[in-house]
Image (cartoon, rainbow, N blue to C red):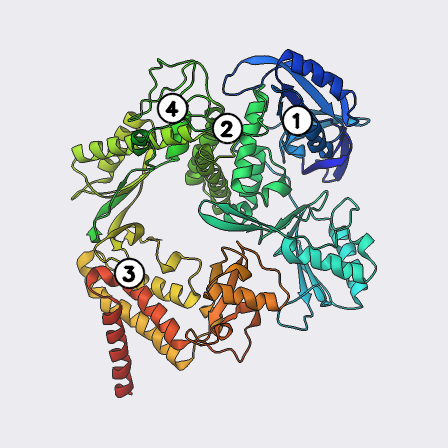
């Protein structure tokens, strides 16, 4: 099953890839349902109201668990609606009709509701019996499978070259050429007028008949641009890129800016291709991080249509897993969450609201350190300790023997929570994929299994975060706090076991430890992991043993360690870096590559003594880059800085570089919102005219100059950030580099 969507009132369109290779469109009658719970008298009055609502097909009483916190079935009213699009209107009409009335399953996404009801999932292998406008499914697949086959999907990439009059393309600019790549063939459409180009593109898409169309910026610019050009040329009604003959819409829609995990994010509006899957590589997380294999895996596991999984947040995808579990168990889904945090005194808050446990790193370089990591620590604890909103501090088991460490919260012994039930399969699948990856003989299989397990990792990570999210259907702060308490307990137990076996803790952060023991053998480390698993129930594995590792201090305070800033080289030769310019997305390529090259030079050292001897050679790398800057031998694209906007450019109170760059785009007619990333080059950092300080990447030309001093300072700072524990601050590095450059000049 490739694609699914509502095609009309009471009807779902289902696209099937037949074993013959044919792509078939089938229709299935499907009426969504919402539920109302409350006192019998209020429900009786509600029945009378339903007779006047046109969108309601029928209603009846059923036994369901209306409140997942109580887990008791009650008599509720099941209301069948003609169309998902009418549910919000029906809900508004019924809301508040009786003091005790509570509506459920109101905002479950349409296609997901259908998948839950039919017990199927995207890319499932199944038999379909089509009888008129009804479909009967026989599932020949399992969502738990780790060795499933996917049909050969035909993928096409689409790119449009805009004949822009200005530096930044706009909807008013004509189409220069259209490039289509599919099955190793490249088709360039560059002849004729605009209307002919668009029609030839539609014809080419129809002939190749791809299942997936890849674009770069299709949601934000490409598809709205094509629709506007088609409108201008009178062919908009023919601009149907999907298998359904539904034209793209010409109006320009704004995306959404939202706040998530401490960051402002931006999501472009979706452009749907019915019967095909549109993947916008600039508007997708899972596809970018885990490829098509990871995208298919989360779509199958969480029962989310491919087109939605390609652009939804990882939290939305994960939530579908819990919604399905609730539906399967006969538990109704809350419409508006109403589970507040239990009242806590100031003393209780100090004990409870503490997050993960950390051991500050010992600054400087260390030899022979072994890094051990818990595998999916938080989700594993949630599953094994039965932690869910309805199980922590449950009313049915006040004397439960299952208690949260430090806090003493009781955990339910009579039922398993929705969150643990939904997690177990995902945890088991990820372990299986990692095992298959490690045992695979061919590189392609290893790649596929690794992408699948990485995709599931994001599902598991997000599941913990959603426990404390105020809008999560099955979340609750008290459950989130309980997981953190169990995690602290597990880490402290692990430290105790490690120290009893002669290991010294050099650093520890939430679910990872860096341990040192003179002459520790691989077997000792393996036995430590087994002992910890037996004690905590969470798997501990060896990430690797370092030849050397350097823990770095704060940039502001040289004596203060930072939890996640370090670099080192494993005995295998693999380099690991965290928290410095080499891995930051906002670092210009020149600075990033210089720091990486410095670390690569240092990585040749076998221990800390050899490391010290390599420092002068690494400084030479920095000096070489500084000399190229001075001589103007740097490609200006290697100086581009990428920064994310926290708000719209006109709302910035100060002329920070990213705000200036965004304002330059606005002048060019580009709509810029908070959460979007702007790219720019620093041209004159101290210019009295703010707009001259930087040049946004889209406006860079052959005349654009860069600020040599500013980028030299960045280089020196990057060098000092990794060498500061060895006495090389910015001033010392600057003196050495400048002196070395003068010495080179004299030699010449």
- Which circle's residue, 3 or 2, is located before the other in the chain? 2
What residue is pinned by disc 4?
A: 385
Is disc 3 surrounded by few (<14), some (14 to 19) or many (20+) residues within 10 Å?
A: many
- Which circle's residue, 1 or 2, is located before the other in the chain? 1
Secondary structure state at the residue bearing disc 4: loop
Give the Cα distance between marks 1 and 4. Answer: 37 Å
What residue is pinned by disc 2?
A: 474
Instruction: Give yes or no for contact between labels 1 and 2 (Cβ–Cβ under 8 Å).
Output: no
Nearer the camera: disc 1 or disc 2: 1
Give the Cα distance between marks 1 and 2. Answer: 22 Å
Give the Cα distance between marks 1 and 3. Answer: 60 Å
Expressed as whole percent of the image width and height from the top left, the position of residue 237 reads 82, 53
Q: Quadrant of residue 197?
A: bottom right
Secondary structure state at the residue bearing disc 1: loop
Specify whether 432 is left or right of 515. right
Quadrant of the image containing the C terminus: bottom left
**Residue 16 in sight from this viewpoint:** no
- Which circle's residue, 2 or 4, is located before the other in the chain? 4
- Which circle's residue, 1 or 4, is located before the other in the chain? 1
What residue is pinned by disc 3?
A: 722
What residue is pinned by disc 1?
A: 95
In-front residue for pair 548/564: 564
Nearer the camera: disc 2 or disc 4: 2
Expressed as whole percent of the image width and height from the top left, the position of residue 272 reads 69, 46
In-front residue for pair 740/561: 561
Give the Cα distance between marks 2 and 4. Answer: 16 Å
- Which circle's residue, 3 or 4, is located before the other in the chain? 4
């Amino acid at each position: 099953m490739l694609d699914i969507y509502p095609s009309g009132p009471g009807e779902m369109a289902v696209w099937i890839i037949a074993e013959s290779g044919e792509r078939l469109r089938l229709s299935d009658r499907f009426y969504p349902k919402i539920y109302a719970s409350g006192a019998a008298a209020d429900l009786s009055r509600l029945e009378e109201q339903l007779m006047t609502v046109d969108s309601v097909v029928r209603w009846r009483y059923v036994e369901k668990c209306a409140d997942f916190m109580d887990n008791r079935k009650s008599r509720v009213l099941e209301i069948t609606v003609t169309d998902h699009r009418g549910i919000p209107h029906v809900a508004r009409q019924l809301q508040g009709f009786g003091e005790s009335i509570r509506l459920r399953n109101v905002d479950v996404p349409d296609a997901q509701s259908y998948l839950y009801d039919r017990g199927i999932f995207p890319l499932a292998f199944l038999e379909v019996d089509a009888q008129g406008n009804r479909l009967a499914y026989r599932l020949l697949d399992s969502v738990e499978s780790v060795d499933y086959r996917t049909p050969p999907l035909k993928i096409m990439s689409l790119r449009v070259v805009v004949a822009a009059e200005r530096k930044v393309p706009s909807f008013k600019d004509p189409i220069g050429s259209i490039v289509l790549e599919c099955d190793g063939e490249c088709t360039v459409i560059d002849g004729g007028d605009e209307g002919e180009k668009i029609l030839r593109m539609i014809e080419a898409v129809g002939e190749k008949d791809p299942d997936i169309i890849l674009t770069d910026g299709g949601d934000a610019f490409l598809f709205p641009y094509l629709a506007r050009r088609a409108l201008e040329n009178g062919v908009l009604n023919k601009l149907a890129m999907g298998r359904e003959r539904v034209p793209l819409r010409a109006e320009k829609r704004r995306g959404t800016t939202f706040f998530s995990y401490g960051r402002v994010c931006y999501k472009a509006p979706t452009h749907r291709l019915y019967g095909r899957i549109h993947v916008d590589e600039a508007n997708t997380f899972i596809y970018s991080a885990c490829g098509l294999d990871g995208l298919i895996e989360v779509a199958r596991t969480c029962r989310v249509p491919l087109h939605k999984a390609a652009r939804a947040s990882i939290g939305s995808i994960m939530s579908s897993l819990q919604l399905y579990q609730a539906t399967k168990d006969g538990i109704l889904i809350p419409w508006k969450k109403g589970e507040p945090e239990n009242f806590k005194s100031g003393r209780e808050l100090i004990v409870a609201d503490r997050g993960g446990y950390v051991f500050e790193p010992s600054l400087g370089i260390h030899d022979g350190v072994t890094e051990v990591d818990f595998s999916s620590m938080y989700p594993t604890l949630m599953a094994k300790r039965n932690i869910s909103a309805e199980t922590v501090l449950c009313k049915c088991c006040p004397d439960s023997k299952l208690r949260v460490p430090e806090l003493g919260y009781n955990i339910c012994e009579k039922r398993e929570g929705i969150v643990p039930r939904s997690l177990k399969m995902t945890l088991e699948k990820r372990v299986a994929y990692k095992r298959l990856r490690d045992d695979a003989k061919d590189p392609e299989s290893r790649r596929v299994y690794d992408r699948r397990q990485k995709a599931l990792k994001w599902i598991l990570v997000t599941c913990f975060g959603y426990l404390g999210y105020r809008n999560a259907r099955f979340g609750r702060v008290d459950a989130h706090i309980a997981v953190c308490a169990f995690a602290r307990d597990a880490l402290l137990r692990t430290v105790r076991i490690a120290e009893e076996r002669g290991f010294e803790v050099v650093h520890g952060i939430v679910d990872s430890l860096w341990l040192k023991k003179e002459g520790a053998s691989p077997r000792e480390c393996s036995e430590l992991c087994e002992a910890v698993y037996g004690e905590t129930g969470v798997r501990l594995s060896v990430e690797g043993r370092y030849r050397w590792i350097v823990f770095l201090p704060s940039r502001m305070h040289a004596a203060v360690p930072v939890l996640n800033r370090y670099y080192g080289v494993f005995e295998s030769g693999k380099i690991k870096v965290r928290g410095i310019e080499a891995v930051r997305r906002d670092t210009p390529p020149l600075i990033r590559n210089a720091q990486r090259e410095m670390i690569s030079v240092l990585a040749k050292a076998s221990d800390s003594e050899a490391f010290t001897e390599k420092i002068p050679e690494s400084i030479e790398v920095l000096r070489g880059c500084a000399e190229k800057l001075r001589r103007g031998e740097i490609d200006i694209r290697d100086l581009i800085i990428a920064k994310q906007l926290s708000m719209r450019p006109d709302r910035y109170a100060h002329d920070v570089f990213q705000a200036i760059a965004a304002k330059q785009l606005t002048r060019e007619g580009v709509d810029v919102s908070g959460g979007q990333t702007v790219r720019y080059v620093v041209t004159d950092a101290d210019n009295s005219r703010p707009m001259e300080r930087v040049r946004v990447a889209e406006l860079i030309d052959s005349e654009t100059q860069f600020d040599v001093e500013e980028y030299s300072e960045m280089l020196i700072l990057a060098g000092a950030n990794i060498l500061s524990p060895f006495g090389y601050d910015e001033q010392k590095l600057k003196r050495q580099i400048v002196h070395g450059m003068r010495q080179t000049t004299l030699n010449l």
